[in-house]
């Protein structure tokens, strides 16, 4: 039996003031008299989200100024747990896209009651963080410390057992005692080293390459609404040198669906011709678990959420929803086990695995297919061999049947959209016999070379390289 959280006069300490950390702070206030958020970066007070985009320097968040759209699962969490944040976003002009607005042309989608959940939020990441931070700043019982560097965890082990985390040590040598410590520091979390220094076992960890580089440049429309168009996903080693603005512009003009955005008088770079092309790389899928197979936490009183626990390829947009889902699950764990932090850790681990693991595995499998890798089959391990065969068969069916079918079939489109938005698990795509049966005729079309047309014109690689070399 561990210290009773509600009975402790000590605060809950949250490391990291990004999306997961701020959401966790709001919900932790239900269980603790004080919540202290420690964030390395400084964010000056801003009245408008546009000012946050322009002035906040978020060294700890490399994707801060890259393009974003937030999946429907995140909006569902906001409605259930943080409705004031959604209200603040709406007041700031954030757009909500329902399923009817993203349905492919020519697909007749009959309304369904649960379509009200399939709503995406279109806004910058900086705007979302601005709204969350504004909901935390000045709220009674929550202290927001910025420009604070955390050096290590503080804790103790008794009778040779596993440690209990009792606080954090800052870079200036001072310590902050804590009832619990929540790591929301993101994909660069130093939790394994911090825990090892206390004598805790290493967390279970899996890691895999994404093969992705991000290039983003922002533009401002000069009139009306922009044309519809996108390049989609482009993953090619020869195209990784797009950080030079002129080269980036030549790249865009190779895609007819995007070139219309850059016709004369339609848009201009948001900060003039010197507007930079933002680059983000060195991305890996990584999963860490801080409860062992027997159900014991590696260190009692320590919890990790968001990218510190489940980090996947940002192209799928699952980071923010996963972080808020785990913030809500931590709230649930403390609600269910108010007198036992070890039981709360088990609850968070078990529920996180149930809610998020299949999406993480799907991201890894998708990246593996994108990189042209095959899952190695170990003949000495029949279960591993079967798992590998199943993964390849599932990926093959998704790529050749379900994805093409969603362009022409309303049932398949809705099914894939719900999975993409983390409302249904990936395995639902094969559990639902109607989805499978409706995709089979499209699979036959694909195999005979009659694949349904893509939503946007495909451009051959050689044509793009020729444009870049001109």
Image (cartoon, grey):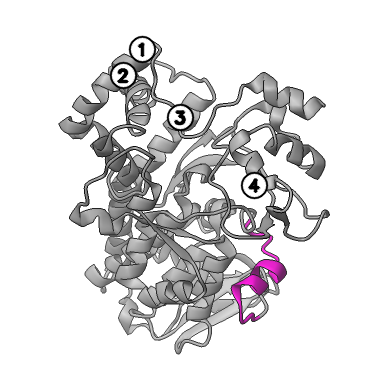
Query: Circle 2 sits in a helix, a strand or a loop, which is it?
Result: helix
Residue positioned 16% across, 30% down in the render: 433
Residue positioned 48% across, 79% down in the render: 135
Q: Earlier in the sequence, mark 3 or mark 1?
A: 1
Q: Which mark is residue 447?
A: 1
Q: Is residue 2 above or below residue 207?
A: below
11 and 385: which one is in front? 385
**Region of the chain picked out in magenta, as a range:** 45-61
Q: Earlier in the sequence, mark 4 or mark 1?
A: 4
Q: Earlier in the sequence, mark 3 or mark 4?
A: 4
435 drawn magenta: no
Residue 25, position in %: x, y? 44, 74
Residue positioned 46% across, 68% down in the render: 181
Q: Is residue 25 above or below residue 272?
A: below
171 and 136: which one is in front? 136
Residue positioned 44% across, 69% down in the render: 23
């Amino acid at each position: 039996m561990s210290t009773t959280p509600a009975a402790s006069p000590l605060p809950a300490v949250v490391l990291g003031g990004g999306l997961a950390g701020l959401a966790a702070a709001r919900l932790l206030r239900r269980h603790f008299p004080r919540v202290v958020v420690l964030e390395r970066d400084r964010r000056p007070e801003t009245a408008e989200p546009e000012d946050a985009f322009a002035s906040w320097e978020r060294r700890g968040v490399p994707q801060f100024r890259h393009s974003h759209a937030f999946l429907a699962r995140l909006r569902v969490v906001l409605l259930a747990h943080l409705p004031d944040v959604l209200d603040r976003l709406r007041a700031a002009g954030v757009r909500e896209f329902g399923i009817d607005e993203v349905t492919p042309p020519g697909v007749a989608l009959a309304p369904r009651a649960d379509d009200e959940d399939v709503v995406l939020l279109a806004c910058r990441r900086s705007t979302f963080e601005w709204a969350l931070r504004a909901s935390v700043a000045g709220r009674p019982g929550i202290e927001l410390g910025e420009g604070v560097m955390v050096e290590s965890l503080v804790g103790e082990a008794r009778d040779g057992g596993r440690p209990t985390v009792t606080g954090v040590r800052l870079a200036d040598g001072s310590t902050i005692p804590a009832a619990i410590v929540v790591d929301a520091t993101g994909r660069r979390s130093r939790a394994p080293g911090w825990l090892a220094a206390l004598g805790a076992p290493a967390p279970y960890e899996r890691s895999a390459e994404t093969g992705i580089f991000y290039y983003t440049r922002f533009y401002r429309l000069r009139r009306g609404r922009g044309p519809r168009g996108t390049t989609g996903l482009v993953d090619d080693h020869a195209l990784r040198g797009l950080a030079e603005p002129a080269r980036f512009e030549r790249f865009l003009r190779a895609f007819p669906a995007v070139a219309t955005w850059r016709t004369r008088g339609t848009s201009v770079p948001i900060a003039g011709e010197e507007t930079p092309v933002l680059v983000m790389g060195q991305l890996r899928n990584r999963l860490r678990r801080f409860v062992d197979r027997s159900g014991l936490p590696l260190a009692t009183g320590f919890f990790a959420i968001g990218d510190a626990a489940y980090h996947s390829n940002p192209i799928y947009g699952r980071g923010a929803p996963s972080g808020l889902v785990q913030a809500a699950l931590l709230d649930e764990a403390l609600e269910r086990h108010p007198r036992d932090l070890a039981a709360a850790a088990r609850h968070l681990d078990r529920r996180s695995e149930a809610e998020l693991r299949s999406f993480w595995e799907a991201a890894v499998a998708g990246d593996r297919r994108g990189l042209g890798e095959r899952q190695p089959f170990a003949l000495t391990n029949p279960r591993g061999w079967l798992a590998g065969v199943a993964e390849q068969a599932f990926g093959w069916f998704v790529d050749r049947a379900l994805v093409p079918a969603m362009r022409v079939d309303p049932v398949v489109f809705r099914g894939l959209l719900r999975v993409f938005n983390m409302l249904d698990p990936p395995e639902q795509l094969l559990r639902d016999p109607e989805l499978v049966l409706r995709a089979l005729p499209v699979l036959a079309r694909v195999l005979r070379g009659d694949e349904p047309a893509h939503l946007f014109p495909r451009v051959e690689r050689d044509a793009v390289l020729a444009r870049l070399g001109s």
